[in-house]
Image (cartoon, rainbow, N blue to C red):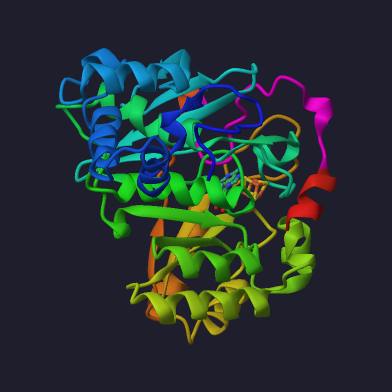
């Protein structure tokens, strides 16, 4: 990696973009010892340092050299909203005007941060507001981990963040390298030190990337299934046309077998009259019978110009009962922060230029 010399843009490197191994390569290139990387990661992520002057265990000379070739650039908070139920939402901006949302959800036992991985999403799931607005760009490592850094600073002492879910805007597996680096910082004891069970990646099923993911990490996995047959899933989650249910579940089994995970979570959005019948619940039980699964039913969160409606509560309960009777741990996700549009699928992040919808990008990357 060429961090200091020969950088194509000759610009300053943002140290918030580097996970520990990249930081080691960076210091090696500067002719410095490896342990400097750990010191720097601690300064940036645990002490919240934004200036080299604060880093008193680095010599003045080293600080001056760092100043020349690098910086610590953190996303800016554009605005913050607080819900009556304690949920908070931040709108963050990095440098080119595209904005992204992060949601903090306090619960009795834990506090979860819902992190975005892209500005928009190219996968166009028909029930998702993010998908309906198109894709603009991938977030950098700094923008992804910056969401946790900002929220951690706010909740330093009162309710530290105990869990991170990659369930904000975007498909994390289509921003693979940046997401993997950011997740490694989340789990790094020199940074946020979260256990791998407390970092969850949610995907709509980018099958080849799921196999790759298993090679580099073993975080908890949530898979957005939403239907038990291909005909319906093709309509709800169009990437299913490329990677149908059978292939997706094979990849899930592989991920599970290799990681000693307790269970894979399957997410299932409850859409009135579309996927919520008892027959569909039974089909789901059958489909998942040979995968250790937990099922999370998500009441559909409406957004403007959608024809979908959320299933009625008794229908959701009936669906849940069928799954539970078949032995599946099944939860119904509580809708949080609905007074500030912070619920699943409602994050829109005020994408600067919606006309840049570019499904071609997805096709090229998938
Ligand atoms: N792209 C990834 C992660 C972001 S979406 C994925 O699809 O898994 C996070 C979760 O929110 C997914 O399970 C998604 O299906 C769900 N979701 C999207 N729009 C929703 C909506 N309007 N109501 C309820 N859940 C929604
Ligand atoms: Fe993208 Fe996930 Fe929304 Fe589908 S549900 S459009 S994959 S963010």
The question of residue 349 being in magenta is answered with yes
Establish if 276 lies above or below 55.
Answer: below
Instruction: Estimate the x, y position of residue 354 in percent, counting from the top left.
Output: 78, 26
Give me the residue at 37% from left, 43% from top: 28
Q: Quadrant of residue 304?
A: top right
How many marks overall?
0
Foreground residue, 107 or 58?
Answer: 58
The question of residue 70 being in magenta is answered with no
Foreground residue, 119 or 87?
Answer: 119
Q: Is residue 337 visible?
A: no
In this view, which residue lies farthest toward the bottom?
Answer: 290
Give me the residue at 75% from left, 42% from top: 307
Instruction: Estimate the x, y position of residue 134 in percent, counting from the top left.
Output: 76, 37
Establish if 250 lies above or below 163.
Answer: below
Give me the residue at 51% from left, 64% from top: 213
Quadrant placement of the C terminus:
bottom right
Q: Quadrant of residue 68?
A: top left
Establish if 336 lies above or below 125.
Answer: above
Establish if 143 lies above or below 71.
Answer: below
Q: Which residues are magenta?
A: 341-358
Q: Is residue 2 left or right of residue 219?
A: right
Give me the residue at 61% from left, 42% from top: 170
Magenta residues, dominant SS class: loop
Foreground residue, 21 or 29?
Answer: 29
Q: Is residue 274 visible?
A: yes
Instruction: Estimate the x, y position of residue 308 in percent, counting from the top left.
Output: 70, 45
Instruction: Estimate the x, y position of residue 27 in percent, counting from the top left.
Output: 36, 38
């Amino acid at each position: 990696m060429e961090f200091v010399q020969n950088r194509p843009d000759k610009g300053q490197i943002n140290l918030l973009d580097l996970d520990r191994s990249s930081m080691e390569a960076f210091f090696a290139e500067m002719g410095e010892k490896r342990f400097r990387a750990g010191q720097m990661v601690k300064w940036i992520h645990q002490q919240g340092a934004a200036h080299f002057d604060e880093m008193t265990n680095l010599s003045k000379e080293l600080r001056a050299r760092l100043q020349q070739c690098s910086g610590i650039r953190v996303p800016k908070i554009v605005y913050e909203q607080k819900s009556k139920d304690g949920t908070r939402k931040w709108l963050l901006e990095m440098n080119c005007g595209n904005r992204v949302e992060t949601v903090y959800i306090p619960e009795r036992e834990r506090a979860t941060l819902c992190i975005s991985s892209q500005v928009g999403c190219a996968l166009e799931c028909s029930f998702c507001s993010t998908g309906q607005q198109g894709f603009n760009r991938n977030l950098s490592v700094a923008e992804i981990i910056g969401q946790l850094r900002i929220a951690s600073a706010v909740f330093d002492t009162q309710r530290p963040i105990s869990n991170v879910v990659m369930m904000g805007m975007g498909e994390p597996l289509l921003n693979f390298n940046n997401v993997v680096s950011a997740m490694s910082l989340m789990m790094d004891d020199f940074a946020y030190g979260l256990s791998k069970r407390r970092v969850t990646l949610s995907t709509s099923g980018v099958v080849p990337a799921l196999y790759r993911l298993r090679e580099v990490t073993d975080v908890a996995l949530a898979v957005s299934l939403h239907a038990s047959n291909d005909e319906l899933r093709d309509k709800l989650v169009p990437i299913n046309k490329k990677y149908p249910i059978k292939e997706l579940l094979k990849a899930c089994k592989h991920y599970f077998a290799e990681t000693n995970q307790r269970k894979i979570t399957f997410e299932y959005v409850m859409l009135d009259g579309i996927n919520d019948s008892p027959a569909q619940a039974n089909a789901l039980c059958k489909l998942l019978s040979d995968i250790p699964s937990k099922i999370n039913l998500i009441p559909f969160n409406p957004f403007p110009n959608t024809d979908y409606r959320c299933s009625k509560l008794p229908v959701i309960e009936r669906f849940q009962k069928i799954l539970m009777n078949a032995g599946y741990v099944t939860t119904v996700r509580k809708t949080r922060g609905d007074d500030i549009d912070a619920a699943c699928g409602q994050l829109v992040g005020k994408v600067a230029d919606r006309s840049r919808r570019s499904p071609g990008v997805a096709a090229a990357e998938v």
